[in-house]
Image (spheres, grey):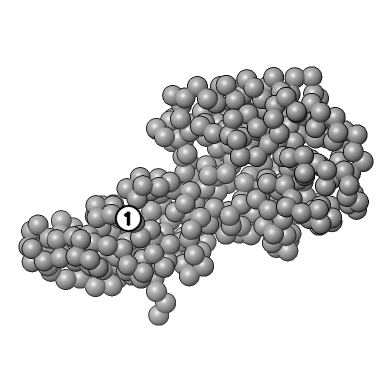
Amino acid sequence: MARPNQARLNLAALRHNLALVRRLAPRARAMAVVKADAYGHGAATVARVLAPLADALAVACLEEAQALRDAGISVPILLLEGVFEPAELQAAAQQNLWVTIASEQQLRWLEQSRPARPLRCWLKVDTGMHRLGVEPGQAPAFYQRLKACPNAADDTVLSTHFASADDLSSARTARQLALFESACQGLPGERSSANSAAVLAWPASHCDWVRPGYMLYGNSPLALDHPNAQPLQPVMTLVSAVISLRDVAAGESVGYGAIWTAARPSRIATVCIGYGDGYPRMAPAGTPVLVNGQRAVLAGRVSMDMITVDVTDLPGVGIGDEVVLWGDGLPVGEVARHVGTIGYELSTRMPARTPRVVVVA
C-alpha cells in the first residue's frame, strides 16, 4: 500500500479562480502564469485546463515553455524573463513564443538574430522593482528600436511589475503606475502591469493585459483580508494520514532535539509526511493542521518523513485518519505565516515524491 500523501488538485477551482479574474478585470485579457511547474501544481495539468480559457500563458524561461509545447499546449506563451542567450530566440520563434525585452543586451541579440519569424515582444519598464527592465526614460527609444527591427512583430506590449501591490497601505504601487503611464505616454500599443495582488486590489492597473498567477491557485497574495479575495478557492490540498498514536506523560519530549515537552498528559499522532514530502522543516510547534477536519497543532520538530501532532483535545482519532496540511479548510498562507514564509514558497517547493492527484476535474 502506498504512503497516503497526496497533493490533491481541484481543477474546477482553477476554472473558478480564472473566472474571478475575468469578473474583476472584464476589459483586460488574461495571461495565466504557470511558471515553476504552475506554482508546484503541475504545469501540464494546469495548462490543459487554462489554455482554452485564458488569452495566453506565461512562464519564466524557455525550458518551461518547451515542456508545455511538448505536452501539446499551443496557445501563446510569454517568456517573462526573456532569453538568456541569442540561440534561444531561434527556439522561441520556432515554438511561437513571445519574449520579454528587458535590457540592452536582449534587444541587441534580437536585432542581430535571424529568427524564422518575427517575435512578439513585451518591453519591460522598470518603475521601481529594480530587478529587470529598462529605465522609464529609455522606454521610448527601446520601443522605437523594436518598431524598426524586422525581427520584432509590430505589436509590442509595454509592461511593468509592482513591488508592493500586496500592501494596500503603501503608496508605492500608485507611484509605479503613474511612472509607467508617463513612460508609455505617446507610445501606441497594449499595456500590462497587474499581477495577482493588483488584479484583486488595484483596478486602475488592469490595463489591456492582467497577469494572474498566485490567485489562480486559490490563494490571496494580499497582506490583509480583502472582499475581492474571499471567493478564491484553493486548487491544492496537501493531505496525509495518521500512522501511529501514543500517550506521552507530562514532562516527556517528542521528536528530534526534544524541543517540545508535554505540559500535560498528551495524545500524540504521528503523520507520515515531512520535509522530504514538501512540508516545511521550519514549521514550529503550534503550526495548525486539520485531523478529521478538526484543528490540531504540531508538537515537536518536522523530520524528513514524519511530523507529530498533539491530538489530546480531539477524541476518537484513529490510525488512518486523514490529515490536511493546507488547502481546503486551512489556507496555505496561514500555515506559511507560522513558518515565517509565504504560501508561494510552500506550494512551489512541492517535490515529485508527493503525487499530484486530480480529485475534481
Percent position (x, y) of residue 332? 40, 49
Provide residue 69's location: percent of width, then percent of height: 74, 59
Residue at image point 81% right, 57% down: 87
Three-letter residue code for mark 1: Ala
- The picture places residue 82, in percent across and down from the top left corner, at 72, 47
Question: Is residue 321 at least partly visible in the picture?
Answer: no
Q: Does any portion of residue 201 appear in the rendered image?
A: yes
Q: Residue furthest bottom?
A: 1
Q: Label 1 crowding class (10 Å Cα cut-off): few <14, some 14-19, many 20+?
A: many
Pick the residue in front: 184 or 226. Answer: 184
* Quarter placement of the N terminus: bottom left
Task: State the image coordinates of residue 286 (x, y, percent, origin top left).
Answer: 24, 52
Q: Residue at x 49, y 45 (%)?
A: 218
Q: Which residue is mark 1?
A: 283
Q: Nearer the viewer, residue 170 or 28?
A: 170
Q: Quadrant of the C terminus?
A: bottom right
Q: Is residue 133 left or right of residue 309?
A: right
Residue at 57% across / 44% down in the picture?
213
Dividing the picture into quadrants, the one containing residue 196 is top right
201 sits left or right of 277 in the view: right
Secondary structure under the numbered disc 1 in the rendered image: loop
- Res. 123 image quadrant: top right
91, above or below 54, in the image: below
Number of numbered discs overlaid on the protein picture: 1
Q: Is residue 69 left or right of residue 257?
A: right
> Toward the viewer: 79 or 215?
79
When asked about the image quadrant of residue 293, the answer is: bottom left
Q: Residue at x 15, y 65 (%)?
A: 253
